[in-house]
Amino acid sequence: MNREQHRFPPDGGLSRPDSSTGVRCILCGSSRIKTLCRSSDLRGVARGTFSLGQCVGCHLTVLTPLPHGFDPETYGAQYYTHQRLDVAALTEYLRKITSTWRAQVLHDWLGYTHLATATRPSRIVALLWYVRNRRSIPRYHGDGRILDVGCGNGDTLFFYRGLGWDAYGVDPDPEACAVCRTQGLKVVQGEIFDAGFPAGFFDIVRMHHVLEHVRDPIGTLSEIRRVLKKNGLLILTVPNIDGIGFAMFKKYWIGLDIPRHLFFYSPATLRRIVEKAGFSCVRLVHLRSAGLLRNSLSLLATHRQILSPALNNTMVGTSLSVALAILGQAIGRGDTIEATFVPRS
Ligand SMILES: [Zn+2]
């Protein structure tokens, strides 16, 4: 597949809705693009002003101008993937899971046959823990391999390795990769194309809050399709631009994170773009994202001074965020969506 043909050109042309420049949406091919909003980097790291252009045909939303590639300058030293791994906390968390009654739940319900303990939890306790954790702990496939695309500082790789997975990561950020290597984690610096993994190598590929950062989503997803086993799973989590948060907060919605996020997905556009790369969707859920709404409220308060920081730090802000998050999830407009895809045969 020619990766270039799926890209918006760097200037986007997206501020010209009736553009006759030949700019085409990478998803549906339409050249009718409307501007949703304009913003600078509200974290104050990157310079310049950016627009969000939305395709009139399919509603795929894109940042313009798009950067030419990964630019560490737009992330800054404080970005969360640059932080050192809290090895002590991660090790303690793993110990709690692998050497307590929780190991028996993993053994009985999620295929972790190498884990077991003498202590069995009650059925109710086991069920409650399973329901709460089943999304973050994938079903084990014997000597399975898992790939975390955009692995950041490797906290998830550390966790999966501790559960018995042969865990690999890729990340374009040299600082994040350096943090991974301090723990002996298998990481490739660059895009997934740079790793050169064999075809059909992985049981699971995970992209957790990463696809929105990717400059060439269809090319990246097609490469994931190549390296996944035929019965493998792709698990994606992205902010939802059709969620309640963007509708309320607009450019102050933390899910935009301009200019680090390049594409902004809804359930429909996420499904469509991943399916275009050769997958079928088997599950899509709206998550409750109170933290994301809470941070949006803080950002709005900081920049517009509508709410004082003092008020913003009270239970009012937190309660409002939790209530909105519950509402968003209930009406199918959660601020985060998680979806599982399988390769289409
Ligand atoms: Zn489109």
Image (cartoon, grey):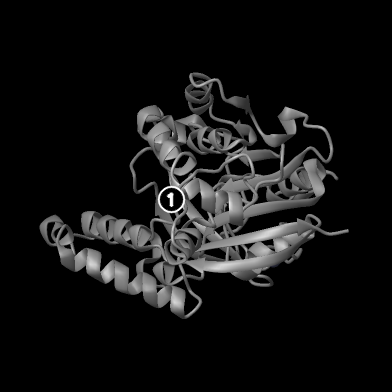
| Position of the C terminus by quadrant | bottom right
| Residue at (40, 37) in percent of width and height | 80
Q: Furthest residue to the front?
A: 118
Name the spot of residue 233 as percent of width and height, x first: 71, 52
Which residue position is annotated with label 1?
A: 257
| Residue at (37, 70) in percent of width and height | 325
Closer to the camera in the image, 47 or 177? 177
| Residue at (54, 57) in percent of width and height | 134
Please give the count of numbered marks on the rendered protein.
Answer: 1
Q: Is residue 11 above or below residue 296?
A: above
Closer to the camera in the image, 195 or 142? 142
Q: Is residue 326 above or below residue 153?
A: below
Q: Mark 1: which amino acid?
A: Asp
Q: Is residue 72 above or below residue 233?
A: above
- Can residue 262 be seen from the camera position used here? no
Name the spot of residue 198 as percent of width and height, x first: 82, 32
| Position of the N terminus by quadrant | top right
Q: Furthest residue to the left?
A: 310
Name the spot of residue 285 as percent of width and height, x first: 56, 68
Q: Secondary structure at mark 1?
A: loop
- Can residue 186 be seen from the camera position used here? yes
Name the spot of residue 167 as percent of width and height, x first: 63, 34
Mark 1 lies within 8 Å of ligand 1 (Cβ measured): no
Quarter of the figure with residue 249: bottom left
* Ligand 1's quadrant: bottom right
